[in-house]
Image (cartoon, rainbow, N blue to C red):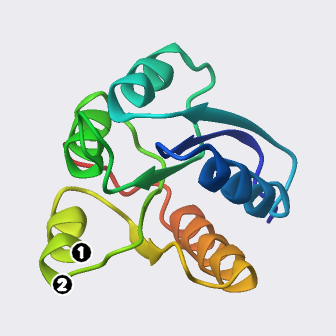
C-alpha cells in the first residue's frame, strides 16, 4: 500500500532532508514536513493534523540529539513508525534507539533503492499490526 499523509524528516543537514524527501515521495503521495533539529521536530509534531504516518530522524544533531527527540516524540504520543538515520552506527546506539521506541535504524550511506525498500517494509509491518499500542 502506498504511503500517504504527513511525513516528518528531521536532519540538521538540508541536503540530507532533500535526499530523504525524494526517497519518501517515491513511496506515495505524501506531504513532507521538515525540521532541522529535535526541538523543532517536537514542535512540528505537536502542530500537525493529521498526525504523521512516518518520521525519519537523524541520530546525531546539535542541541537535542535524535535519541532524546525520539523519546519526546513517543512521550507526546507519536504512534507512527520512527526510523532512525545515522552516518555512524555503533551497536550501542542502535540498541539505545530501539529500546527508546525506534522501529528501524538505517545508515545514511545505504543506497536509495534499499532505503525505499526498508521504509516500505517498516510501513507494511506497521500496517499489519495497527492495534499494537506504543509505549512512551
- Residue at 41% across / 18% down in the picture? 43
Estimate the x, y position of residue 41 in percent, counting from the top left: 43, 30
User: What is the C-alpha distance between the residues marked 2 and 1?
Assistant: 5 Å
- Residue at 40% across / 34% down in the picture? 37
Q: Tell me if residue 75 comes above or below residue 90 in the rendering.
A: above
The N terminus sits in image quarter: bottom right
Return the mark for residue 94.
1
Estimate the x, y position of residue 134 in percent, counting from the top left: 29, 49
* SS for dot 1: helix
Return the mark for residue 91.
2
Q: Badge 2: how crowded within 10 Å, few (<14), some, or many (20+)?
A: few
- Residue at 66% across / 51% down in the picture? 15
Q: Nearer the viewer, residue 52 or 109?
A: 109
User: Which quadrant holds residue 34?
Assistant: top right
Residue projecting furthest to the top: 47
Q: Nearer the viewer, residue 80 or 63?
A: 63
User: In the image, is 80 to the left or to the right of 78?
Assistant: right
User: Which quadrant holds residue 75?
Assistant: top left
User: Which quadrant holds residue 68?
Assistant: top left
Estimate the x, y position of residue 79 in percent, counting from the top left: 41, 44
Q: Nearer the viewer, residue 101 or 12?
A: 12
* SS for dot 2: helix
Amino acid at each position: 500500500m502506498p504511503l500517504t499523509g504527513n511525513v516528518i524528516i528531521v536532519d540538521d543537514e538540508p541536503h540530507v532532508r532533500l535526499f530523504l524527501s525524494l526517497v519518501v515521495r517515491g513511496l506515495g503521495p505524501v506531504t513532507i514536513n521538515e525540521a532541522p533539529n529535535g526541538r523543532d521536530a517536537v514542535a512540528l509534531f505537536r502542530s500537525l493534523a493529521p498526525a504523521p504516518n512516518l518520521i525519519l530522524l537523524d541520530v546525531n544533531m546539535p542541541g537535542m540529539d535524535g535519541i532524546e527527540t525520539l523519546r519526546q516524540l513517543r512521550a507526546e504520543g507519536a504512534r507512527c513508525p520512527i526510523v532512525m538515520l545515522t552516518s555512524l552506527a555503533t551497536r550501542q546506539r542502535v540498541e539505545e534507539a530501539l529500546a527508546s521506541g525506534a522501529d528501524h535504524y538505517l545508515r545514511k550511506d545505504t543506497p536509495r533503492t534499499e532505503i525505499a525498500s526498508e521504509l516500505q517494509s517498516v510501513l507494511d509491518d506497521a500496517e499489519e499490526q495497527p492495534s499494537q499500542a506504543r509505549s512512551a
